[in-house]
Amino acid sequence: MDVVVIGDGPGGLSAALFLAKNGVSVCVYGQDKTAMHYALLKNYLGFPEINGGEFQRIAREQVERLGAKLVNARVDSLSREGTGFRVTLESGERVEARFLILSEGKSPRLAQQLGLSSEGSGGLKVDINGKTSLDGVYAVGRQVRPERSQAIISAGDGAAAAIDILSILKGAAVQDWDSPPS
Ligand SMILES: Cc1cc2nc3c(=O)[nH]c(=O)nc-3n(C[C@H](O)[C@H](O)[C@H](O)COP(=O)(O)OP(=O)(O)OC[C@H]3O[C@@H](n4cnc5c(N)ncnc54)[C@H](O)[C@@H]3O)c2cc1C
């Protein structure tokens, strides 16, 4: 697997969308327990009003249609394995990945396990593309912005991390732009 995403809220799904759309193998782990199921979105540009659960349903279908794998499982632990990472599920199953994107939401247990540090009472320290201090590990969404947690921000974070990984894999800046047929 090129990329494993931990977390299936808007941050993780958005990252998976950009990666899968561009032909990168990506697997998202989560059990659809996102806070979005408690939200009524009136602040997501392009959707005047939508129930968070319905938003998730559409997003999950979209991401799967583009080729990402959504797996209903919880990740137990993460460790370095050669030039990539080993992902161990609660079932004991193991998967290997070249890149990790953490989008764990309000309880970033795995980020702590990897030894990633937070900024005071704020979120995890990352650069503008969600890159953490560990090479190959990104973090996005609520776990990097606990006090700025809106779905559209998480989705934007996920997109930026994905584009960064796409650019690394290509060795040149990637613009994910499409135009309508003329
Ligand atoms: C009551 C309420 C109302 C809200 N209303 C709005 C609103 O109107 N507008 C708005 O923009 N936002 C709203 N929000 C906030 C919105 O839900 C969050 O901004 C958004 O869900 C954050 O997305 P995320 O992807 O960063 O994290 P999350 O959506 O929290 O996703 C994280 C996911 O990762 C999973 N996960 C964590 N650890 C693991 C693991 N080890 N293995 C597998 N999966 C794991 C979690 O179960 C979860 O599904 C509201 C939130 C609440 C609680």
Image (cartoon, rainbow, N blue to C red):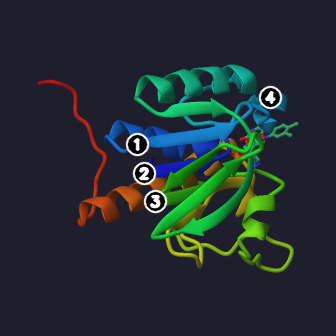
Does the residue at mark 3 contact the one at mark 2 (Cβ under 8 Å)?
yes
* Residue beneath disc 1: 25
Q: Earlier in the sequence, mark 3 or mark 2?
A: 2
Please state the horizontal and vertical placement of residue 66, each as a whole percent of the image: 40, 28
Q: Earlier in the sequence, mark 1 or mark 3?
A: 1
Q: CA distance from mark 4 to mark 1?
A: 27 Å
Crowdedness of circle 1 by 10 Å Cα count: few (<14), some, many (20+)?
A: some
- Residue kind at label 4, given as amino acid type: His
Does the residue at mark 4 contact the one at mark 1 (Cβ under 8 Å)?
no
Image vertical order of residue 82 relative to residue 36, above or below: below
- Residue kind at label 1, given as amino acid type: Ser
Crowdedness of circle 4 by 10 Å Cα count: few (<14), some, many (20+)?
A: some
Please state the horizontal and vertical placement of residue 31, each as a whole percent of the image: 74, 32
Q: Nearer the viewer, residue 76 or 92?
A: 92
* Residue beneath disc 3: 98
Helix, strand or loop for disc 3: loop
- Residue kind at label 3, given as amino acid type: Arg
Q: Nearer the viewer, residue 88 or 175?
A: 88
Image vertical order of residue 169 relative to residue 42, above or below: below
Quarter holding residue 40 = top right
Helix, strand or loop for disc 1: loop
* Residue beneath disc 4: 37
Q: CA distance from mark 3 to mark 2?
A: 5 Å
* Residue beneath disc 2: 2
Quarter holding residue 126 = bottom right
Please state the horizontal and vertical placement of residue 163, each as a whole percent of the image: 39, 55
Q: CA distance from mark 1 to mark 2?
A: 5 Å
Q: Is residue 136 left or right of residue 155?
A: left
Crowdedness of circle 2 by 10 Å Cα count: few (<14), some, many (20+)?
A: some
Q: CA distance from mark 1 to mark 3?
A: 10 Å
Does the residue at mark 1 contact the one at mark 2 (Cβ under 8 Å)?
yes
For the point 40% across and 59% down, the residue is: 165
